[in-house]
Amino acid sequence: MTDRPSPCHCRVLREATRRTTQLYDRHLAPSGLRLGQYSVLAVLARAGPLTVGALAEALVMDRTATSRTLLPLQRDGLVGSGPGRDGRSRALELTPTGRERLAAARPLWLDAQAAFETAYGSEEARDLGRSLTRVVERI
Amino acid sequence: MTDRPSPCHCRVLREATRRTTQLYDRHLAPSGLRLGQYSVLAVLARAGPLTVGALAEALVMDRTATSRTLLPLQRDGLVGSGPGRDGRSRALELTPTGRERLAAARPLWLDAQAAFETAYGSEEARDLGRSLTRVVERI
DNA sequence: ATCCAATAAGTGCATACGCACATATCAGAT
DNA sequence: ATCTGATATGTGCGTATGCACTTATTGGAT
């Protein structure tokens, strides 16, 4: 019995993520936000003013990628940046417009979340979430 | 008790995928391949000549995204395309160079796969793979 | 006061991803 | 032979992602 190596963990992660992102993006489309942008706004709404680095850490994202993800959000006036405590850092926070857009998008996100759980199973979804959180902690 | 909605399934998927992709890409770096490119070559090596559409389906990827993912691989001579049975379709297959690169990258991929399993747990990794496969099937 | 390692962020470059739309081809109905 | 709906692919556009490298500040050591 020649042990075949297990299927690529990274590949199946990416495949599941592509499918799931499409589902969420379809639901969020009327809000004009993508899932990634919704996540940024949600973090800023909950965790108050953040530096780029802190936001990146919260999103488990590269700092420079976060920086660029912010560009369209700042361009559209959803996120504003004031001076940080340093001359180095910026303090990012939602604008009033940003709060409105987030509020408008939230029911759509809830729909997407519900659609995922209906299709996949609520229990299983909870377990999957725990498993993925462990991936972030350990990898 | 106000039921807070569960954490965003899509967000945690994306976060885990970002981390994991970085791990695999670091391991694969000496081969000059990214994990996504390695996946393309691996599918073509196993499933013989494929059309763009069939490759996209195998990778659970949008057709047009697949098309563009192929560009650097074709530019670098790792994937070749002959005429398909139709005048419409192309038949994609590995070039000899592509087979060499894939063979060279495979031990690096095995390292990455092993690193993931060591950090995350082999059993848990297998379960996670099954869960993610179900996501692809159901979402 | 000056210098330097550490910190926060931005740039250049390349790949990754998908939607809306356009183009080419084919297979079957007429 | 022709028309038409289906099929296979490509393009324009915009966002997503991260590495290597650079710039600006800062806090402390001298």
Image (cartoon, coloured by chain):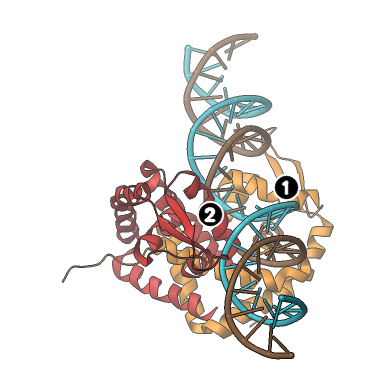
Chain colours: A orange, B red, C brown, D cyan
- In the picture, measured across the screen, residue B40 lies left or right of residue A23, that is left
**Relative to A47, does residue B7 appear above or below in the rendering?**
below
Q: Position of residue A86 (x, y in %)?
A: 68, 35
Residue A48 point in image, percent of width and height: 70, 55
Element under disc 2: helix
Instruction: Give, as a three-letter code, the residue at label 1.
Output: Leu
Gap between marks 2 and 1 measured at Cα: 25 Å
Q: Position of residue B55 (x, y in %)?
A: 48, 65
- Residue B128 is left or right of residue C24, and the answer is left
Q: Label 2: few (<14), some or many (≥20) within 10 Å?
A: some
Residue shown at the point (69%, 56%) measured from the top left? A44
> Residue drawn at (81%, 54%), measured in percent from left and top?
A95
Q: Which quadrant is home to the N terminus of chain B?
A: bottom right
Depth check: give the residue in front, A17 or A105.
Answer: A17
The C terminus of chain B lies in quadrant: bottom right
| Quarter of the rendering containing residue D15 | bottom right
The reply to whether residue A73 is visible in this rendering is yes
Helix or strand or loop: what does disc 1 sit on? helix
- Residue B50 is labelled as none
- Badge 2 is on which residue? B69
Q: Which residue is mark 1?
A: A71
| Front one among D27 and A129 | A129
The residue shown at (46%, 69%) is B58
The chain containing the residue under callout 2 comes to: B
